[in-house]
Image (cartoon, coloured by chain):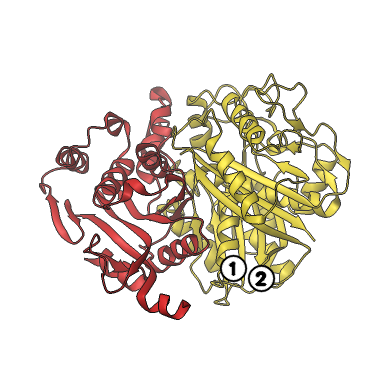
Amino acid sequence: MPQLYLKKYKLENFIVTYCKIKNKSVSLNGELFFEGSQNDDLTAFLGRLYKKTELNYPKFFKMDKLCKLGILATELVIRNTPDFGTFSKNEIALVYSNNASSLESDRTHANAIADKQNYFPSPSVFVYTLPNIVLGEIAIKHKITGENAFFVSEHFDAELMYSYTNILLKTKNAASVLCGWVNVDGPNAEAFVYCVKNLNFKQENGLDEYPDQKTHNSKNIQHLYSL
Amino acid sequence: MSVFFGAHNIISPLGYTSRENFEALVNGKSALQKHSFSFSEKPFFCSKINEAELDKRFSWLANPKEYTHLEKLCTLSVKDIVTQSGIDLRDKNNLLILSTTKGNIDILENKYPDISPQRAYLPELAKTVGDFFKTKNAPLVVSNACISGLLAIIIAKRFIENKNYKNIIVCGADLVSEFTLSGFKSFNAMSDEACKPFDKNRTGINLGEAAASILLSEDKLSNISILSGASANDANHISGPSRTGDGLYQSVSETFKAAGKNTVDFISAHGTATDYNDEMESVAFSRAGLSTIPLNSLKGYYGHTLGAAGVLESIIAIQSLSENTLIKSLGFETPGTVEPLNVITQTKKTELKSCLKTASGFGGCNAAALFEKI
């Protein structure tokens, strides 16, 4: 019986949805979703993308650029993951990473305290001087209460993202994982967010509800990131 | 599969080894003092590591002028682990994990005219420390607010269990800087006196500087292992803890569930001494049925050492287990949390087999782990 079961069904982790934001261009599952104007600065671009997604989330305007970028990319992934609403919120893990940590907000806070005649440290800036605040914003927006991890690496590290995500799924510390690279450094911004899920499906039927799914491995992750 | 703890080190104003630090705590010594800073008229109560002493010790390893304050702390701390254990980071089976919230943040304060500003990037800090030990694998950086240290230990355990690595050194470190002092002050979160975790008259946090490192291994390097660990998000507020303690409760219950346990000998809590944090912890521990378990916070000795806290406090907890000694929660006098807690008021010898370590931080994050002596 177990043999038959194995032949008919396949239990595997899949990248079910992915979103890439780079050079003011936004793609979803490999297709262009939005193209910003090259004349816009990063804040203006993020504002236009907010309008395009019809987010209607006033908290967005309080966020720093890193959180705005992370919230938008993650929103697009969640909206395009067909049965996301049925996932148990305490079984969704957030595994994100970047290169510049929160340096953009760090510089703003450092500037606010550099001049003793004009000394204005602000709690609304200081709170964003941690990279995992973006995980907090995503968790609040979508009521996600599972595992958290924020890694900082020189480049997007597909192998690291794959191994840690795989461990969380294998050890049942998560049933699905939102993974991301969300980096803001000066005028440069880049986001790559994707959803990984363990799917138990009949092989002959394929994965109709997830037409763009890819097997979760570091080669596929690197490939989708490089698109 | 069990993952064991091996060599450990703490560098703080209380000493340059974990042994010195533990003995100082047993003797009731605190690292917290009034420190004056050029940017502030009023002094701050905090714990800060003497630069001249650090340079003197570091000069045995390399030229202190080529390294930042934090890089010197991390390198010395990891060096102690390498010396004690003989672990070779040039081996592909071994990994260094760095846990920090702000890294070389004093570079933004232009403290080092001769050091590249690139080292303000956390991967560059990690590379500088890693290069000293010629690590085969690029060091991994975990930066997850105040749970960074404990989360890094949990991540190390998971990687070893999954056979990604055989040995992992977790080094947690953060500075006391104008950056963090001014930031927490703008939050009105700072206490003008030595902090009083879980006390009725608590008035906020003190910041502390430390580096702490610990080795985790698939080999039985000691009789203390990490049984399980978990993290969870409150999904409630980015800078305020959940009133219901949801995330901490979930971390604790998942940790117990994974270990197949429902109680523990003592708790090494987070206890920052802010109103809301300590309140939240009391609610979460009460929900988990742990109100009567002896508990401490070490913030009264070290202040909040941010990215180092989870590692430093885990090392003290591990020494408590091996020395069968409960460390009193310094600064606590009068119970003052909404749910009762059994705060340790006297350092004492008692048979100890297991410890629950917890942490909570900005961004709504929480973590818990169970350590056991066999």
Residue type pointed to by label 2: Glu
Residue placed farthest to the front in the image?
A1
- Kindly indicate which chain is depicted in yellow in the rendered structure: B
Residue at point 45% right, 59% down? B124
Would you name the residue on which mark 2 appears?
Answer: B218
Q: Residue at x 56, y 63 (%)?
A: B158
* The disc label shown at residue B160, or none: 1
The answer to whether marks 2 and 1 mark residues whose Cβ atoms lie closer than 8 Å is yes
Q: Position of residue B246 (x, y in %)?
A: 53, 36
Asked whether the viewer can see residue B111, the reply is: no
On the image, the x and y values in percent for residue B343 come to: 76, 32
- Quarter of the figure with the N terminus of chain B: bottom right
Q: Decide which of B286, B10 is in the foreground and name it.
A: B286
Q: Is residue B324 shown left or right of residue B75?
A: right
Q: Chain of mark 2?
A: B
Q: Secondary structure at mark 1?
A: helix
